[in-house]
Image (spheres, rainbow, N blue to C red):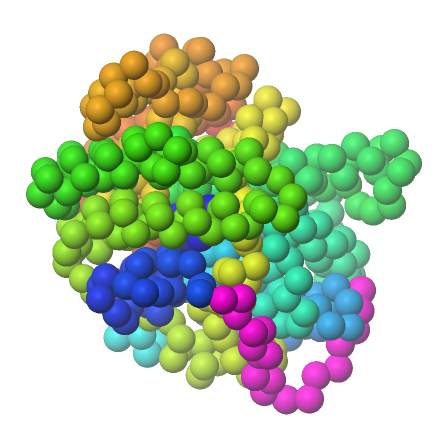
Amino acid sequence: MLVTWLISSTVVGSLLGATSAGQIPIRGGVIGGVSPAQTTPVKAETLKTVVTTPGALRVVENSGICETTPDVFQASGYGDLTATESIFFWYFAARHNPGTAPLTLWFNGGPGSSSMLGLLQELGPCRITNDSSSVTLNPFSWNNNANMLFIDQPVGTGFSYGNMSVGTSQEAAADVWTFLQIFLKDSRFSNLAANDLAIWTESYGGHYGPTFAAYFLSQNAAITAGTVSGLHLNLKTLGIGDGLTDPITQYAGYIAYAGTNPYQALVPTDYITTANLSWDTPFTGCQARIQSCQSSTGSNSNALCSAAQSFCNSNILTVLIGEYDMYYVPSGVPDPYPPDISSYLASIQSKIGAEVTWQQTNLQVYDNFANTARSPDLELVIDSGVRVLIYDGDADYILNYNGVEAMVMLPPYIHRKAFCTDASYQIASMNTKFSAQFNQQVFAPYKVNGLLAGQFKTAGTFSYVRIYGAGHEVPAYKNGSLEVGQAAFQFFSQTMANQSLSST
């Protein structure tokens, strides 16, 4: 069950019990632990009698919630995939030139975590206040120059509801494609069908993003060939923040980050030594278990992956965070930031057309994803010509920059001698048509209005940026005299304009 190791959005909290966000299951004292048995699906609590419209949208227009900029259109509601599968969305038109602005999809991770997190805590038109009671207008909202579509998926996530059968990123991609076909055929949104399309996501989105992008490209090819009927999706951009894409490369990054990061060592050195042994031990160590999971097929696959998750989370992930917040290591636990959004959503849910009680993370959906390993689609998408940005906050442990940078750089950026015992081993890395050029580049300072915000590298249409002072939800943070979300807005804007990253 590799997917649930490297969870999704917001703060995980204390190792000993409750989390401030209530998002990550703690089972048997293990963060992201394996469910002892297959959970029984919990039917979402409906707020009213529901009548679905398979193949169509049910929409509330201009609710007046969140986006209060004059004359900016918004809509929220459901796209009914079937009579028993409904996906919730919240759309905000661009504040400037919505007719020609690209359509940008946003997905939080999990799997099973609501995209309302990204909307209200990170990059949407409004941001939740620290007391969780209201919202304020966000000047660095990503809908300044892009039409933003926040989607709760898979079915069962957030305000979405119905049969929770999706258990792989490929299945999720098919449902999202179907939803977009419904959305873009609706007369209120059909003008967006010809606009450029972008996918932005975070955390488990390191699987979602590449898989969705590759699926959209394959469907476009099938539509052109006449074997599939549907609207061509004009995919141009993919952005992944603090993402899980290749567990076997990224997992070793915990060991490096726990001992050496920009803030403080997270645990004593003997914990690092023990974690190295847990990683290295032949046949029964974390690395060997991940390899067994990734190479397994058939009925034995889920058992091997669940065993890998249980062992690695118990002996490496949970142990190495120490007394710090795994999504923002400068803080102890539990860190109340980003603020909780559940009470605010409960106060507005009927006004935005939501028909079920909101779930920040649906544990049934979380548990459904039982056998996902590396996502090779990222390389395919980069080589296809889609502009790709990977970004990471240097204060994030759960998907730390050590693991992400090890994945994206070739030849190997991190040598295992830095944090493991076998000096002859080098981490596998991503290999694209830009990789050799990318690795030859040196990190350049990334500045926003002359203020240092991070460091970056670019080759061709692929870029990577590490943002200083940011936790797991990068747009939720500020650094120095920059405003909250200002650095993230700059790299988003540059990427969406089909430009390589550059300092300003």
Q: Quick one: quadrant of the C terminus?
A: top left
241 versus 120 height, above or below: above
Question: Can residue 175 be seen in the rendering of this structure?
Answer: yes
Q: Closest to the observer: 372 or 261?
A: 372
In this figure, what is the number of numbered marks? 0
The residue positioned 83% from the left and 47% from the top of the image is: 230
Q: Position of residue 62 (x, y in %)?
A: 59, 72
Q: Closest to the observer: 239 or 352?
A: 239
Q: Residue furthest front?
A: 283
Kindly report the secondary structure that dominates the magenta region of the rendered protein: loop
Q: Closest to the observer: 282 or 204?
A: 282
Q: Residue furthest right?
A: 226
The residue positioned 59% from the left and 87% from the top of the image is: 47
Q: Position of residue 266 (x, y in %)?
A: 14, 45
**Range covered by the magenta-colored residues:** 37-57
Position of 154 with respect to 136 (left or right) is: right
Q: Position of residue 238 (x, y in %)?
A: 54, 37
Q: Position of residue 348 (x, y in %)?
A: 48, 80
41 versus 153 height, above or below: below
Question: Can residue 488 be seen in the rendering of this structure?
Answer: no
484 versus 491 height, above or below: below
Position of 448 with respect to 324 (left or right) is: right
The residue positioned 38% from the left and 71% from the top of the image is: 341
The residue positioned 71% from the left and 50% from the top of the image is: 174
Task: Let me know if residue 372 is in the magenta part.
Answer: no
Quarter assignment of residue 211: top right
